[in-house]
């Protein structure tokens, strides 16, 4: 298990469909007691209920607070109920072509973080984000968002599939992050 200090943003390089990628993501999302975690998931391809089910299966106890932003997903999510606890999870959507709108949703979530809880964020994935925006726009967005996470003492990790990009693209994004982890 990799220990990541609060205030750190990680570029997680791993093939999109690898089991090791999933395992490393779960390790980074659950660095401590779930009762003290505030987990924010930004996803381009997973549905909220499958994210909750996966958390329950791998971690067990639900975090103190969970937010899920479905980028490009259906707009009919009012909230998803965890069938085990009956907890409602905050779910919202964002347009994949509108980084400003996505940034506003993320900022709204960060404004409500309980300082007693550890903020943990997963953006899955930069590979999909780059299908909608150019590298320069993605970098500006990431630079702003990772800065907000540092200020909030959050732990962020951002997935990218290195096999799907020219190495130059990944090199252009790396300065937004404090650390890189490569999963084979």
Image: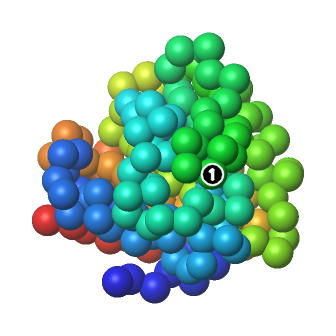
Of 5 and 32, nearer the camera is: 32
Q: Position of residue 161 (x, y in %)?
A: 25, 48
**Callout 1: 10 Å neighbours few (<14), some, many (20+)?**
few
Residue under the point 50% across and 70% down: 30
- Looking at the picture, does residue 136 appear above or below residue 176? above
Q: Is residue 69 left or right of residue 10?
A: right
Examine the rendering and report whether any part of residue 130 can be seen. Answer: no
Examine the rendering and report whether any part of residue 182 can be seen. Answer: yes
Q: What count of labels does the image hold?
A: 1
Q: Position of residue 124 (x, y in %)?
A: 42, 44
Q: Position of residue 69 (x, y in %)?
A: 60, 35
Q: Position of residue 128 (x, y in %)?
A: 37, 33
Colour pattern of the rendering: rainbow
Of 123 and 77, nearer the camera is: 77
Location of mark 1 (residue): 85
Residue under the point 50% across and 20% down: 72
**Element assignment for label 1:** loop
Residue under the point 61% across and 14% down: 75
State the image quarter where residue 55 is shown: bottom left
Q: Is residue 146 left or right of residue 70?
A: right
Q: Quadrant of the C terminus?
A: bottom left
State the image quarter where residue 99 is shown: top right
Q: Quadrant of the N terminus?
A: bottom left
Q: Is residue 8 left or right of residue 47?
A: right
- Looking at the picture, does residue 178 appear above or below residue 48? below
State the image quarter where residue 115 is shown: bottom right
Residue under the point 46% across and 56% down: 56
């Amino acid at each position: 298990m990799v220990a990541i200090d609060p205030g750190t943003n990680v570029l997680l390089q791993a093939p999109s469909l690898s089991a090791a990628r999933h395992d490393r993501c779960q390790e980074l999302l659950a660095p401590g007691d779930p009762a003290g975690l505030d987990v924010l998931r930004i996803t381009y391809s997973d549905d909220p209920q499958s994210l909750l089910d996966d958390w329950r299966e791998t971690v067990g106890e639900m975090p103190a607070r969970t937010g899920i932003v479905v980028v490009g997903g259906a707009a009919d999510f009012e909230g998803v109920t965890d069938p085990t606890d009956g907890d409602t999870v905050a779910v919202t959507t964002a347009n994949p072509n509108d980084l400003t709108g996505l940034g506003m949703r993320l900022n709204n979530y960060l404004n409500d973080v309980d300082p007693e809880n550890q903020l943990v964020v997963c953006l899955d994935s930069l590979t999909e984000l780059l299908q909608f925006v150019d590298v320069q726009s993605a970098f500006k967005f990431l630079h702003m968002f990772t800065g907000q996470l540092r200020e909030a003492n959050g732990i962020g990790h951002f997935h990218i599939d290195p096999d799907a990009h020219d190495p130059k693209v990944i090199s252009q994004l790396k300065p937004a992050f404090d650390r890189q982890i490569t999963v084979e």
